[in-house]
Amino acid sequence: MDKNAKIYIAGHRGLVGSAILRNLQNKGYSNFVLRTHAELDLTNQNEVADFFLKEKPEYVFLAAAKVGGIVANNTYRGQFIYENLMIQNNVIHQSYMNNVKKLVFLGSSCIYPKEAPQPMGEDALLTGPLEYTNEPYAIAKIAGLKMCESYNLQYGTNFIAVMPTNLYGPNDNFNLETSHVLPAMIRKIHLGKCLEANEWDTIRTDLNMRPIENVNGESTEESILEVLSKYGVRKNTEGVQVEIWGSGKPMREFLWSDEMADATVFVMESVNFFDLTNVIESREIRNTHINVGTGEEISIKDVANLIKGIVGFSGELWFNTSKPDGTMRKLSDVTKLNQLGWKHKIGINDGLYRMYSWYNKYTIE
């Protein structure tokens, strides 16, 4: 990929998209075409067609998606499948129609069956039922990777699908109504520490940056305590308690977003579709997507306690077993990616320290 090549990053303001942009800039790439959601609605077929016809990007990173945690996935099931299918269909098809040299599509490890053998290799795809709570999102991502694979086989395109594990990092979503488990825990435990120390100025600053159900830093103390309690941050005569959904027993794999970006750029620069098919002896070419992760896992309880220590919260973590756990294990088999030449370097401890440092800096500013 030439340093002056025209690159389109769909979703450049999100967790992964912003990390991809930083990575490319650090490597000397400078010719970017970028659009915010307000400037380009990727679910609109005509808008996307006009954009590609006008801009003619040479390389495309498809990182735009409708994303959220277990609550959002289970609540907005229709939105999650519709919006993700529309985004993918429009961007992938127009990339083909406008002769894009290469596209990398970002999916998710939730594409694998709920009871998939651990660690989950690429060949586990479509071998069993999905986890119910995020089934619509998973089906959309499966459709996206199969669309890339199918266009490659029929049209000779060079579209690669990568399936990241749970990601976290700068520009993550800390909205307690829609966030994933790790940023939600960081924010809740941070607010618990502030409540514990009666640091109301810090709490109000946090809520001004990220209101919860229209409750912000200008709201009354009573309103703030009420909304914090609703989302599991509660103060009583015995101290402060932070609620974590589920038993804490599920095992999860977490990857720092800048490492996901580095792996994605590596795939764009170094891996082609034929690299993923030349070892297949069968006439049926399938499962050419690539898992991206660490190959290491940690329990929700252990990661919550790590965050508790990093934040400096001395209150109680209460694991609410009446809430769903989701899949008990979701460990990626990253053998294919490692053999292609990329391996992660940042462990969960280091990543959490970086994450909380970024969160504090962003909240203060």
Image (cartoon, grey):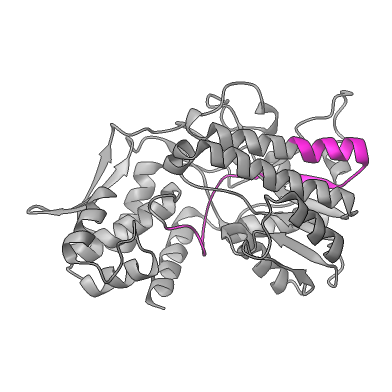
Q: Quadrant of residue 202?
A: bottom left
Q: Position of residue 68 (x, y in %)?
A: 49, 47
Q: Which residues are magenta?
A: 146-174
Vertical arrangement, residue 247 with respect to residue 22, above or below: above
Which x, y percent locates residue 302? 36, 45
Residue 155 left/right relative to 329: right
Q: Position of residue 172 (x, y in %)?
A: 50, 59
Q: Work out whether 219 lies above or below 328.
A: below
- Compared across the picture, whether 279 is left or right of 251 comes to right
Judge by depth and name the residue closer to the eye, 288 or 322: 322
Q: Nearer the viewer, residue 4 or 254?
A: 4
Direction left: furthest residue: 237
Q: Is residue 340 visible?
A: no
The quarter in which the N terminus is drawn is bottom right
Taking the spot 29% from the left edge, 50% from the top edge, the residue there is 231
Q: Is residue 59 left or right of residue 124?
A: right
Does residue 296 appear in this view? yes
Describe residue 302's horizontal placement relative to residue 179 as left or right. Answer: left
The single residue placed furthest to the top in the displayed view is 128
Q: Position of residue 344 (x, y in %)?
A: 62, 54
Query: Front-most of 65 and 295?
Result: 65
Would you say residue 324 sits in the magenta stretch? no
Q: Quadrant of residue 120?
A: top right
